[in-house]
Image (tube, rainbow, N blue to C red):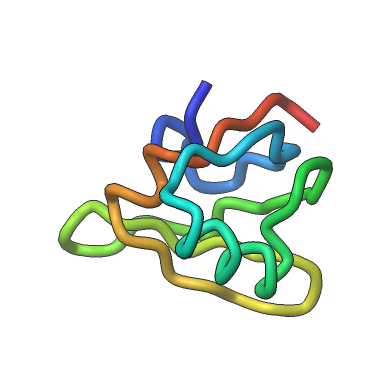
């Protein structure tokens, strides 16, 4: 399933990322790597997501949230 389909409050584990290589590198620098545990904190007004990753809170746009594939943690 993709991260965008997860409801606020969900805890999921990142399985793979399908964004272009340059974006993938930036996401990896932020901690979005295979096996990372994410918490969906909420949805933005335009459809993006707020996620928790470790101690960080990160906003993702809709397209990026569709390109992050996850499984239940």
Q: Position of 22 compared to 46: left or right?
A: right
User: Viewer-proximal residue, 45 or 53?
Assistant: 53
Q: Residue at x 60, y 65 (%)?
A: 25
Q: Where 69 falls versus 63 (above or below)?
A: above
Q: Residue at x 78, y 78 (%)?
A: 55
Q: Total marks drawn?
A: 0
Quarter holding residue 15: top right
Q: Position of 30 compared to 58: left or right?
A: right
Residue located farthest toward the bottom when viewing the structure as drawn: 56
Q: Residue at x 28, y 50 (%)?
A: 62
Q: Position of residue 1 (x, y in %)?
A: 52, 21
Q: Residue at x 69, y 25 (%)?
A: 71
Q: Position of residue 42 (x, y in %)?
A: 44, 58
Q: Position of 51 compared to 28: left or right?
A: left
Q: Where 64 falls versus 35 (above or below)?
A: below
Q: Where 43 falls versus 70 (above or below)?
A: below
Quarter holding residue 59: bottom left
């Amino acid at each position: 399933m993709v991260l965008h389909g997860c409801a606020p409050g969900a805890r999921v584990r990142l399985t793979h990322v399908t964004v272009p290589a340059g974006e993938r590198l930036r996401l990896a620098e932020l901690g979005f790597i295979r096996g990372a545990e994410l918490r969906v904190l909420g949805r933005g007004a335009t459809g993006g997501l707020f996620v928790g990753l470790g101690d960080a809170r990160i906003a993702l746009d809709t397209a990026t949230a569709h390109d992050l594939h996850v499984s239940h943690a």
